[in-house]
Image (spheres, helix red, strand yellow):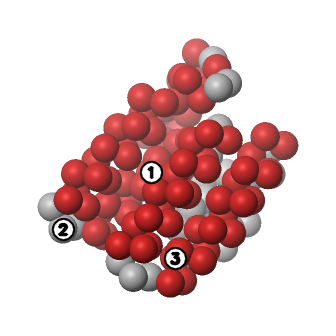
Amino acid sequence: MSKFSNSIAPYVIEEILKAAKTQEAGDYSSAFTYLENAHVLGQESTYWHVKVHYLMMLWGFKQKNTKEVIGQIIRIIGAALLTAVKGVPVGNTGGSNVSPVKVMPIKPEHAAIIFKAKKNA
């Protein structure tokens, strides 16, 4: 795993755990929002990028959301192949509700975390 992957891991894991907790409580919308946060934070790491798309795909299965499942399968392949060559759009939240190539603004708190993780990498 890269130094960035290790440095960003606690923040991505925190969002993944929030997603799991809220999903268990039946709040599927908030759970997906936490997965989107994890995606933004970890998308420059092949490991975290692929893992979050996998978790989004599982979310889609649980929701019986075929569009999300198919979209995530495509995104898993793209994340695995393109992340290492910087082929990902910065800030993209990763859900099938947005284009996989759309650059999106990053929340200031996420930008600060990413900056800190890169600095520590």
**Helix, strand or loop status at disc 3:** helix
User: Residue 26's mark?
Assistant: 2
| For the residues bearing labels 3 and 1, Cβ distance under 8 angstroms | no
Residue 120: tell me if it is visible.
yes
Q: In the rendered structure, which amino acid carries the disc numbered 2?
A: Gly
Q: Mark 1 points at which residue?
A: 37
C-alpha distance separating marks 3 and 2 = 18 Å
**Residue depicted at x 66% and y 64%:** 75
- 36 sits to left or right of 21: right
Q: Which circle's residue, 3 or 2, is located before the other in the chain?
A: 2
- Image coords of residue 64 (percent x, y): 39, 82
Q: Mark 3 points at which residue?
A: 68
- 53 sits to left or right of 19: right
**Residue depicted at x 66% and y 73%:** 99
Quarter location, residue 12? top left
**Residue depicted at x 57% and y 62%:** 94
**Helix, strand or loop status at disc 2:** loop
Quarter location, residue 45? top right
- Image coords of residue 11 (percent x, y): 42, 34
- Image coords of residue 40 (percent x, y): 54, 49
Q: In this view, does 37 lie above or below 74?
A: above
Q: In which quarter of the image is the N terminus?
A: top right
Q: In this view, does 13 lie above or below 102?
A: above
